[in-house]
Image: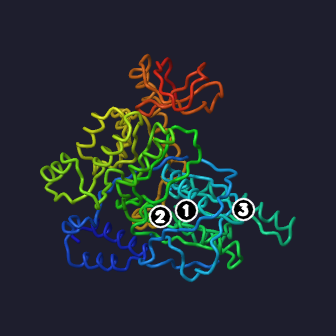
Amino acid sequence: AESTDNQDAAFDWLVLALELNDSLFGTMMMLQLSRHSAAAMLRRGALAARFSSESMVTKTTFSGPGLSEFIRNSKEETTAPVVVEESTMNMPSRITELSEIETTVPKSFHIETYGCQMNSSDSEIVRAILLKHGDDADVVLLNTCAIRENAESKIWRRLEVFKQNKLKARKQKKGTPTQTVGVLGCMAERLKSKLLESDKMVDLVVGPDAYRDLPNLLGILTQGAQDTAVNVQLSLDETYADIAPVRSDDSNPAAFVSIMRGCNNMCSYCIVPFTRGRERSRDVHSIVDNVKVLRDQGVKEVMLLGQNVNSYHDKHTQGTFLGFMHHVQQERGWICEQGYRFVDLLDRVSAVDPEIRIRFTSPHPKDFPDDVLHLVNDRPNICKAIHMPVQHGHSDLSLMRHVAYDHAFMFAYSMRAKTHAAHRMEDNVEEATKLRRLAQVIDTYNTVVTAKNKVEDQGRLHIVLVQGTSKRSALNLTGLTDTNKRCVFAGMMKLKLDSAIDARVDLCQI
């Protein structure tokens, strides 16, 4: 490679290839490093622009199946369990060595979800998988986030509670099986050894690409074949496209639809490519069908989810939005590959029902063609709000004042293992300094957004989708505007959820 930075980026890809057990891809990357320039690697898509965004805050280890076993469509039909308590992120085939073990899942299960909207969507996938099978067990599953240290700390505290509860149960009921505790998602992949061996906190560890294997792994534990079970193997093509998610709250008029998984951007400080693997897209037809099912269930707002939604690419179908193809070919000199891109998908999804609002998150600045902006502008039911991650700004916070963001997700930085930053940089900023700077950012945002809302929204009429009662008072209702701003209004408790009303804003505050 021609520069240290490009070598570093390629090295990050090589590390990820090894994490994926993808020796062929790893070998190809080593050949590229030795034989090709950085420009050639860019043309091959081996390097990615370094932007990043943060997500919101809501004993035997198996090597995992090979590529030939990546996809398994389960055909078992048994009595569905009852979900007693839940909350609001191809690889996972049955492990051949365990083929004789009966598939077992709980009659009742409890899922706790931490982290971003992708995790909420994943919890609905897990719920669907477990409801499709049934037998004996009581299981608590924590769907976890690893993007920041604070998110992991919450989960460790919660696991300590479950650990103490299990110890008490063993003392009180000797010989009686105790509750099974499992960790799913990003933290499972990142800290599998620590979770199972060092702290002995959990019985089950399952990565974000191995949820299909949950019934099988639970069978191992329930029948006493082993004390612990794990599958954290990342996949090259798992999208769960054939699984219809089971929503945690049928009364909510808004729903998530995952359109892709993984991320191909190697941002310096982001752990996502290492916990969720490489980028792959669902086929457009399964997504449109998913939205139609939600429409029939009465859903009025759909959020399309992906780590980088506007790099969506269904290569199996010829795209129809010719404007985007022309833009790519003429303006950037790229060769347009066959298939649906994000603008094609957005066009199809928004045409399902003009009464359903469509949102999407999160896009990446480097993959944002004008065609997407034109479609958002022209299609009334595509919400006029865009989540746009920013790499950095000036120390005087002039960027926040100049842009005047409607929303901001603000956190202190925490180093993540395996990332480019962890390999080559030092986190040398004291915690007190981080917190002081964070407070400055929050204060600046609050000041700017309050002033902006008073100018742009106070006295203005908005169409608001009613979503439920306010967290602060059961006498008030709450909902979102087209621009993703939350409104609270009183004296209208007879309104149904999913109603769309005209609301005039009287007061703007944080």
The spot of residue 470 in percent (x, y) is: 60, 30
In which quarter of the view is residue 170 placed? Answer: bottom right
Identity, as a three-letter code, of the amino acid under mark 3: Asp
The quarter holding residue 323 reads top left
Badge 2: how crowded within 10 Å, few (<14), some, or many (20+)? many
Pick whichever of labels 2 and 3 is earlier in the sequence: 3
- Residue 8 locus on image (x, y percent): 32, 68
Pick the front one: 280 or 275 = 280
Q: Is residue 47 above or below residue 310?
A: below
Q: Do the residues under discs 2 and 3 have CB atoms within 8 angstroms?
A: no
**Disc 2 to disc 1: CB gap under 8 Å:** yes
Q: Which residue is mark 2?
A: 275
- Tell me: residue 274, above or below residue 457: below
Closest to the camera, between mark 2 and mark 3, is 3
Q: Residue at x 24, y 56 (%)?
A: 318
Is residue 301 left or right of 380 when viewed as pictured?
right
Real-space Cα separation, disc 1 to disc 3, in angstroms = 22 Å
Question: Which disc is residue 187 wearing?
Answer: 1
Query: In terms of secondary structure, where does tag 1 sit?
Result: helix
Alpha carbons under labels 2 and 1: distance apart: 8 Å
Amino acid bearing label 1: Met
Position of 159 relative to 305 (above/below): below
Q: Is residue 501 above or below residue 52?
A: above
Which of the image's four quarters has the N terminus?
bottom left
- At x 39%, y 69%, the residue is 236
- Is residue 100 among the parts visible in the rendering? yes
